[in-house]
Image (cartoon, rainbow, N blue to C red):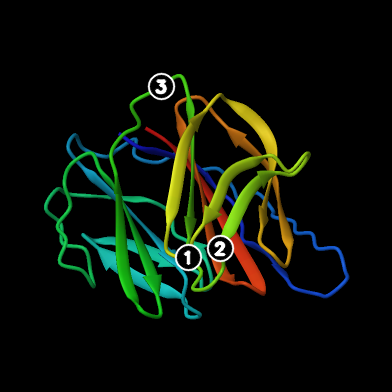
Amino acid sequence: MFKQIKNFAIASATLLPLLPLSTSAELADSKSLYDLAPEGAAFVRIVNVTDTTFSAEIDGKAVNAAATCGISEVVWVNEATALPMTDITVEADTLYTMVLSESGTTVEQRKAATDPYKAEFATFNLTTDATVDVVTTQGLRPVFKSVAPGASQSRPLNPITIGLSLMNESMQVDMQEVSLDRGAVTEAFICGNEDELTFALSSYRN
């Protein structure tokens, strides 16, 4: 069973020659989900990389995602529900992330994490042309190196609250301090392009 902890608002930075870059992101309201989800349900959310707001109904549940790296709330759906714009039908106890881009729809599937004592951190590079490093804001120690466009990386970490930043050859984009909680999965979705990086964070617990 998955339970959403929080979504974070979007932040971005645009390349400005010779000027320092910084970002701020306001924490969205926390919301626990799935208290009423039946045994064997599946879970679906949208990450919208297009420049148009997305709204749909999946198995009778309204799903809405703002434009430009917007993340919807997670909704539960019945097993074998067909995902719109794909040929996928969902399986029980699986979280499906539908990524909408100008080139089409891709789907990432995740089962429950296996280590309840670790935090899991993942990043998804949804840009078309920017290879990105994820580093600690203080000390610039690498967390993920050279995440290519269209690629993702993940790793278990000891639980910690830490400042993280995105870096490429042109800029550094600072995220707010991120709480990597025991038994939770925190994901960074990177959008935009090599001259303007945008990110959104989402965290949930099994």
Q: Which of 74 and 147 is in front in this view?
A: 147
- Left or right relative to 68: residue 205: left
Q: Quadrant of residue 113?
A: top left
Q: Name the residue under label 1.
A: 149
- Circle 3 residues within 10 Å: few <14, some 14–19, many ≥20: some
Q: In the orientation shown, which residue stands out farthest toward the top? A: 117
- At mark 1, the secondary structure is loop
176 lies left or right of 89: right
- Where residue 98 sits in the image (x, y, percent)? 33, 61
Q: In the drawing, what numbered circle is on residue 131?
A: 2
N-terminal of the pair, mark 1 or mark 3, is: 3
Q: Do the residues labelled 1 and 2 touch (CB within 8 Å)?
A: yes
Residue at x 59%, y 60% (from the top left corner): 199
Q: Earlier in the sequence, mark 1 or mark 2?
A: 2
Which residue type does callout 2 highlight?
Thr
Going by the image, does 205 lie left or right of 190? left
Q: From mark 3 to mark 2, how far is it between C-alphas? A: 31 Å
Which numbered marker is on residue 116?
3
Q: In terms of secondary structure, where does tag 2 sit? A: loop
* Residue 69, horizontal then vertical, whole percent: 52, 66
